[in-house]
């Protein structure tokens, strides 16, 4: 008897609005993005029970952090297009924007680059100062002051490829790119910028912390203004046209009504095509 052929594996570019979820990673008794996706895929026959352990995720975002371009992969008996359409029916806060075939050994966590975007109200802020401070954080640094302390401890050196500051509507737009990020790194870096602005952190102390010469106790910036924009693996995703647009729009309008990022985030989620950050020298 010949062995049964394994199901092909696909990667899917997904986004989600964090409102109402208790984080991304599945937890017993909690409503999470991953738990909702995996349970829904099994229920719809897109993820076989024996393949559940091969469901993989690029980035496990914190509670309250939104995503426009996270990546998941799993084997499925369906075509890539059909499985992507199933993903678009599981929850109005979750959508799939595209799919790509990948080898069974594909590991979404091994990405070329991750892009996070944080929104800060720009009123009363000097963009030039924020650009100067953000530029200090580019390059390879000791990130022990900018990450959650783990037990056992993780390596704390890391590289920030770019940290740009631009403007969009009423916001300063902070775009950070790196191959990987430490836990809480983006929110702590934003927290450091806020302390610098209010004179509660010296630029010299920031420089010392970045080389490991000083430990800082930094606040976590609120998660509701943070969006995982893209995880880049160099995959040629086949795009999906938006479906269920009117239902999704009504949900997003209600969910974002009280968020400080409402208008900007709502536009990105509706279009599913956020703009690239412009050069730092442009307004």
Image (spheres, rainbow, N blue to C red):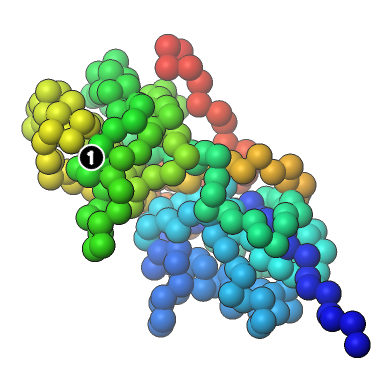
Q: Mark 1 sits on what residue? A: 191
Task: Provide residue 108's location: percent of width, then percent of height.
Answer: 58, 54
Residue 114's place in the image compared with 73, above or below, is: above
The reply to whether residue 20 is in sight is: no
Residue ID at (26%, 40%)? 143
Vertical order, 138 against 5 (above or below): above
Which quadrant of the structure image shows residue 91? bottom right
User: Local crowd at mark 1 within 10 Å, few (<14), some, or many (≥20)?
Assistant: some
Q: What x and y, as percent, mark residue 181?
A: 39, 45
Q: Is residue 86 left or right of residue 135?
A: right
On-image quarter of the C terminus: top left
Q: Quadrant of residue 138?
A: top left
The number of callouts visible is: 1
Q: Quadrant of the N terminus?
A: bottom right
Label 1 secondary element = helix
Above or below, 213 relative to 97: above
């Amino acid at each position: 008897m010949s062995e049964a052929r394994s199901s092909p594996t696909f990667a899917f570019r997904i986004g989600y609005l964090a409102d109402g979820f208790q984080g991304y990673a599945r937890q017993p008794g909690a409503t999470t993005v991953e738990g909702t996706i995996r349970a829904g895929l099994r229920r719809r026959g897109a993820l076989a029970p024996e393949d559940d352990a091969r469901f993989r995720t690029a980035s496990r975002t914190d509670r309250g952090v939104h995503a426009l371009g996270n990546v998941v992969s799993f084997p499925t008996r369906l075509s890539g297009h059909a499985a992507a359409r199933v993903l678009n029916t599981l929850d109005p806060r979750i959508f799939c924007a595209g799919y790509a075939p990948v080898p069974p050994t594909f590991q979404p966590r091994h990405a070329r680059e991750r892009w996070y975007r944080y929104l800060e109200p720009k009123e009363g802020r000097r963009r030039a100062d924020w650009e100067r401070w953000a530029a200090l954080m580019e390059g390879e640094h000791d990130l022990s002051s900018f990450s959650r302390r783990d037990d056992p401890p993780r390596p704390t050196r890391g590289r920030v490829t770019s940290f740009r500051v631009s403007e969009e509507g009423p916001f300063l737009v902070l775009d950070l790119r790196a191959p990987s990020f430490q836990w809480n790194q983006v929110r702590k870096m934003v927290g450091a910028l806020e302390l610098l602005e209010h004179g509660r952190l010296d630029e010299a102390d920031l420089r010392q912390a970045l080389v490991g010469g000083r430990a800082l106790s930094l606040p976590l910036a609120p998660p509701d203004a943070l969006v995982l924009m893209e995880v880049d693996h160099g995959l040629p995703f086949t795009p999906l046209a938006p479906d269920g647009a009117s239902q999704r729009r009504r949900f997003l309008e209600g969910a974002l009504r009280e968020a400080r990022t409402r208008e900007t985030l709502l536009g990105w989620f509706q279009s599913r095509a956020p703009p690239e950050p412009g050069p730092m020298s442009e307004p």
